[in-house]
Amino acid sequence: MRLAAIDIGTNSVKLIVADVEDNQIKDVLIDIPVITRLGQGVNKTNEILPEAMTRTLDVIKDFKNRAKALGTVDISVIATSAMRDAKNNTVFSQMVLEQAGLDLHIASGEEEAELTFLGACSDPELLEKNILLVDVGGGSTEFIIGQNGNINDGFSIDVGCVRLTEELIHSDPVDSDDLQKIIHKSISMLYPKLSSIPPEMREIVGVGGTITSLAAVYQYMEGYSNIEVHKFILTKEQIVRLLTHLRRMTLEERRKVQGLQPERADVIVAGAAIFSTVMEIMKAQEIMVSKRGLRYGALVKRAVRD
């Protein structure tokens, strides 16, 4: 069965089209992200801006056309943090229904965590492991603790790379004061929950655009001849090095960094700081990068319904 999922995040919109058999993702035909910044300004106004709606809707319509052209029988559309926070989320949902002909589902923080875990565990290598899954998004970060494909606990915290960038970064390059504010805010929000998680025998897995970008940037920086993000291992030391390297650049310089989408250049420092803080609190020395997140989970969940 050929299925598609559109994941509408605070920072980006992602499309996957794949063949799913026996609740397993077999062949992936398309897996692409486009940064639309739907959550622009939501942290301040609690509303989605009209221009952000237009940008995002244009991409959704394009994604629908691509999916249909490949013979997709069903398209799941799921929105996350920005839509949860916005007072005018029903306005955008109605636009998507009327102009794209798609039903948009706004996932709760717990559902977002569940789908993200389900997506990561669609990789057989992770299915049998004891993991802490971390997804740093634009508006929030999801944490899922699970083993053998089953979720033991999951929670969402309103710390995201777009949210912290808009709130706390006011310098270019990012000066030490702004960086410390991000780290302190991250610690204050993350420590109460993360400090209670026993780190023993738990593999940390990172998903989402922040960690995949950091893995790509690191490999380009170190001169790797073959860039492979999925299942790449980043150490805490490497993430700290990347954070230091990127925050000393101007925004224009970061936009030219190999492996980093230019549209992600303004939020990558905050995203790297969140991951660095998570690893420090958890006393973790390394993190495995996975490209399989919420959109993969949405495909598996849709297939199970049949």
Image (cartoon, grey):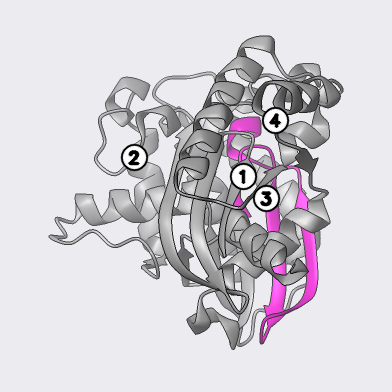
Mark 3 vs 2: CB contact within 8 A: no
State how far apart marks 2 and 4 are (Cα). 33 Å
Q: Are marks 3 and 4 in contact (CB under 8 Å)?
A: no
What is the CA distance from the residue labelled 3 to the residue labelled 2? 20 Å
Kind of residue indicated by mark 3? Thr
Magenta span of residues: 135-163
Q: Which residue occupies the foreground of this view, 271 or 31? A: 31
Q: What distance separates the C-alpha of mark 1 from that of mark 2? A: 20 Å
Where the N terminus falls, by quadrant? bottom right
Mark 3 or mark 4, which is nearer to you? 4
Label 2 neighbour load within 10 Å: few <14, some 14-19, many 20+: many
Q: Decide if residue 102 is on the left or right side of residue 45.
A: left
User: Is residue 66 magenta-colored?
Assistant: no
Q: Which residue type does callout 2 highlight?
A: Leu
Q: Quadrant of residue 283?
A: bottom right
Residue, disc 4: 101
Residue named by callout 3: 141
Q: Nearer the viewer, mark 2 or mark 4?
A: 4
Q: What amino acid type should be assigned to the residue bearing mark 4?
A: Gly
Q: Nearer the viewer, mark 1 or mark 3?
A: 1
- Dot 2 corresponds to which residue? 260
Mark 1 lies on residue:
7
